[in-house]
Amino acid sequence: MKEFVTIARFTYPSEYVVLKLLLERSNINFIFLNETAINVMPFHSNAFGGIRLQVHQKDQEKAIQIINNLNNTKLKIV
């Protein structure tokens, strides 16, 4: 996991559903940390530091570009 870097944080899983699909379609190596714990205990999201999107270092620029492109549409990453 040392090769993965955090590029975004989310409070609830519903905030990144579209982003997750776009990352999968682009074959980007990623993981959402704390996703399961926050699904079980959603009101503890802040205590866990939110759901952290981590991508492999080699995919970092491509993933940030996807987030920026998504933010330039009507669907915005919170």
Image: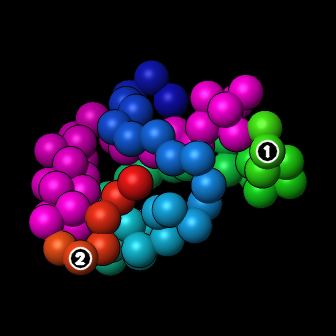
Residue 51 forms part of the magenta stretch: yes
Please give the residue where the numbered disc 2 appears in the rendered image. Answer: 74
1 to 77, vertically: above or below: above
Query: Which residue appears at 49% of the width and 71% of the height?
Result: 17
Q: Which quadrant of the figure has residue 48?
A: top right
Q: Nearer the viewer, residue 38 or 20?
A: 38
Specify the farthest residue to the top.
2
Q: Which quadrant of the figure has residue 7?
A: top left
- Residue 16 spot, x, y in % from top left: 47, 63
| Callout 2 amino acid | Lys
Q: Which mark is residue 43?
A: 1
Q: Tell whether 17 sits left or right of 64.
A: right
Query: Which residue appears at 61% of the width and 29% of the height?
Result: 49
Query: Which residue appears at 39% of the width and 41% of the height?
Result: 8
The answer to whether residue 65 shows anywhere in this view is yes
| Callout 1 amino acid | Phe
Start-end of magenta stretch: 45-72
Residue 19 forms part of the magenta stretch: no
